Image: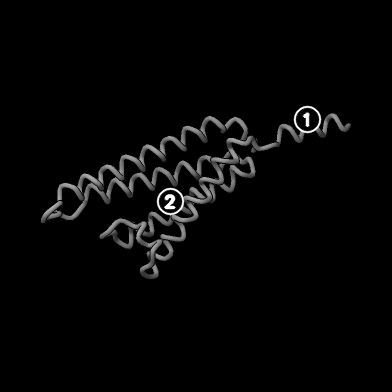
Amino acid sequence: MSEENATSNDENKRPGFLTVLCILTFVGSGLGVLGGILGLIGSSALASLVPAGGTVIQTAGGLVAAGLCLFGAIQMWGLKKQGFMLYLIGIIISIAISLYAVVTLPTVVGVGAELVVSAMWTSFAIGLAINVLFVILYNINKKHLIN
């Protein structure tokens, strides 16, 4: 009987790499949720995570995206498969909002305008790459999610 319990515990054990991914997501998405809340209620250092000129809809959408990613990571921490889908939906929303913000940039004029636009696109590309990487890494670990 103890052998069956050991096998059952091994099957339900979260791999170290999945643990690291979840912790990184807890930190990043937790800051995103906090920044989104503070962005909606007023200005703060974390509210600066919201792009300059961002609308309330963009801020609220970012808050929803971060919340879905955070809740999805919590589910995956508990080895639940639906957590991956929640995380994926949050990432898709996040990418869509970021792309919308960059594409609809107000016309930037003045000295260094090209540099500002270039920096915004670079920031979008880096964020996209990180999000896609995390989705791939979570997908690789999806085989460990059981219910």
- Residue type, label 1: Thr
Kindly report the distance in space between the C-alpha atoms of the residues bearing marks 1 and 2. 37 Å
The reply, left or right, for residue 48 in relation to residue 114 is right
The reply, left or right, for residue 88 in relation to residue 109 is right
Asked if 10 appears above or below 20 in the picture, the reply is above
Please tell me how crowded label 2 is: few (under 14), some (14-19), or many (20+) other residues with Cα within 10 Å. many
Mark 2 sits on what residue?
A: 65
Residue drawn 49% across the image and 48% down it: 69
Name the one closer to the observer, 117 or 63: 117
Residue drawn 33% across the image and 59% down it: 57
Give the image location of residue 49, x and y in percent: 36, 57
Q: Of label 1 and label 2, which has the lower sequence position? A: 1
Quarter of the image with the N terminus in it: top right
Mark 1 touches mark 2? (CB < 8 Å): no
Give the image location of residue 34, x and y in percent: 46, 60
Quarter of the image with the C terminus in it: top right
Residue drawn 31% across the image and 40% down it: 125
- Residue type, label 2: Ala
Kindly give the residue lying farthest to the right in the view shown: 1
The reply, left or right, for residue 108 in relation to residue 47 is left
Which circle marks residue 7 in the picture? 1
Q: Quadrant of residue 38?
A: bottom left
Asked if 52 appears above or below 81 in the picture, the reply is below
Which circle marks residue 125 in the picture? none
- Secondary element at image label 1: helix
Kindly give the residue lying farthest to the front in the view shown: 111
Asked if 30 appears above or below 37 in the picture, the reply is above
Residue drawn 36% across the image and 43% down it: 127
- Secondary element at image label 2: helix
Give the image location of residue 126, x and y in percent: 34, 40
